[in-house]
Amino acid sequence: MLDMILSFIFPNKCPICDNIISYNSLICKSCLGKTKNLNLKREISTIKNKTIYCVAPFKYDGLIRQAILKFKFQGKMSYSAFFAYMMSQTIERYYSDIDFVTFVPISNNRKIKRKFDQSEILSEKISKIISTPLKRTLEKMIDN
Ligand SMILES: [Zn+2]
């Protein structure tokens, strides 16, 4: 009920086309077909004979890239629900035994300018979706 009331004050918007969508939707029907979850998995490193993988629901290009940039730099916080859901789907596809969720934080200077840390927001939502604790394990030392 509170979500419905809030949706009148802060309407939920599609992260791709920015049109208003229902309060319990993540994306509009029109854009759903344009944003297929690719469930990407790439080997990125090997540490102590263990292979480290990066998984992602999308390639960083086109409509998805534009939506991510709006989320990060134009304060489109509502887009985080869609990205967190899609990231959770990909994580659960490849991993079943996860100890915790963590994130690489942005620097304090950027957090002050941006007013939020997009990685932290996504991690909090993913943690809830996949019912896995969130741990703040990393600290940004260099403002790059
Ligand atoms: Zn849309």
Image (cartoon, rainbow, N blue to C red):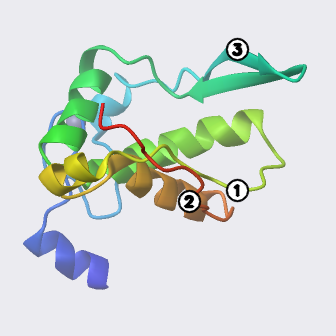
Tell me where residue 24 appears, x and y as whole percent. Answer: 35, 62
Residue 129 position within the rendered picture, expressed as x and y whole percent measured from the top left: 58, 59
Mark 2: which secondary structure? loop
- Look at 38% across and 25% down and name the residue there: 35
Check the image and report above or below for 4 versus 38: below
**Residue projecting furthest to the bottom:** 1
- The numbered dot on residue 136 is 2
Q: Of tags 2 and 3, which is closer to the observer?
A: 2
Q: Residue at x 42, y 54 (%)?
A: 120
The residue nearer to you, when weighing 58 against 133, is 133
Which dot marks residue 22?
Answer: none
Q: Which residue is mark 3?
A: 43
User: Residue sitting at 59 percent across and 60 percent down?
Assistant: 127
Please tell me whether residue 11 is drawn above or below residue 80 in the rendered image.
Answer: below
Counting residues from the N terminus, which is met first, the one under dot 1 or under dot 3? 3
The amino acid type, in three-letter code, at marker 1 is Phe
Q: Quadrant of the C terminus?
A: top left
Residue at point 21%, 25% (across, down): 66
Tell me the kind of residue under disc 3. Glu
The N terminus lies in quadrant: bottom left
